[in-house]
Amino acid sequence: MELTQADVNDLLARLGPGNSYLYLPGDLDLQYLTDLLEDRYGAPRTLVLDGFTDPTVDDSRGAALILPFEDRAVMLRAWAYGDRWVGTGTARDAEGTARSVLVTAPREVPQPSGVALDEDEDIDWMERLRLITGWTHSDQRPDMDWREMESRLGTALPSDYKHMVQTFGKGAFDGFLDLNQEPWTSLREDDLLIWAGTEHENLYCWRADGGDPDHWPVVVRSFDGEDIAFDCQAAEFVCRILIDPHHPFTMARFFDTHWFMNYG
């Protein structure tokens, strides 16, 4: 059974929106399926390995995928995608034979209520970003050595960006917008520092032309080389593209709920 992206869509459609799983044909290349899902949904989280469940797994990290198998899961990896968990791996069937499986489960993501994009000057955009993504985990990178990094780059960095990296760590918003753990300098000759990017080859930058970094505007360098400036900071920019359907780089038209996919 040779899988294509269309085959993955068909399999997921057969599973439906609720908790469901499917034993896959014995001649299926499980690594190939895992690679297809990784290409689509990003880096997975390992829930079960060699029959042992990661003790940190909870409802916010894909525990619902394990429930149908009780103690029969042998290996299981999980992806977050909007309001759905997707998992694949191996589990023992009723006869005790380890077989490849594809499993899905609903994913609870808080709706971005109370986070309307008003123009209040006192908005805490990082707190708003936590609410929008339903982020409840502890800080992922609290020990970042910003002094060393800023010395190496020759400039201070915006405080909201540092807060984002410390809070979320390595990963992507909606599995799409990759947050750089250190700004890229490949556009330094254009006074641009790159703090994020997407698979569509848009680069999210600051116009780092001196002055207070907390007042650097965001500039999007599009895949065709056009620069588009926005008078806001990085955290505000991310909030707006997540939930403002009228933003030129919006992701609101693709997803009703939003999340941060941590690659750790």
Image (cartoon, grey):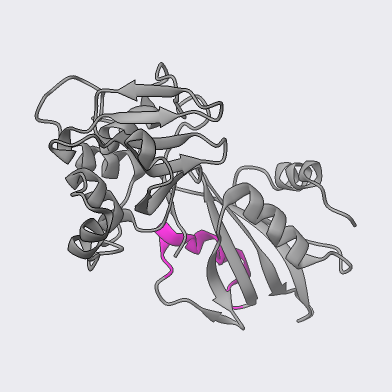
For the point 25% across and 29% down, which residue is it? 217
Vertical relation: 73 (above or below) 85: below
Give the image location of residue 82, x and y in percent.
50, 42
> In the image, is 2 to the left or to the right of 90?
right
Vertical relation: 48 (above or below) 251: below
Vertical relation: 198 (above or below) 31: above
| Image quadrant where residue 187 sits | top left
Vertical relation: 240 (above or below) 37: above
> In the image, is 235 to the left or to the right of 181?
left
For the point 56% across and 41% down, which residue is it? 199
Give the image location of residue 126, x and y in percent.
22, 42
Give the image location of residue 44, x and y in percent.
56, 61
Looking at this view, name the residue that lies furthest to the front.
Answer: 189
Q: Main secondary structure of the magenta part?
A: helix
Query: Can residue 84 be spotted in the picture?
Result: yes
Along the line of sight, the residue nearer the viewer: 231 or 55: 231
Give the image location of residue 59, x and y in percent.
42, 59
For the point 42% across and 20% down, which residue is it? 245
For the point 37% across and 38% down, which residue is it? 189
Stretch in magenta: 57-71
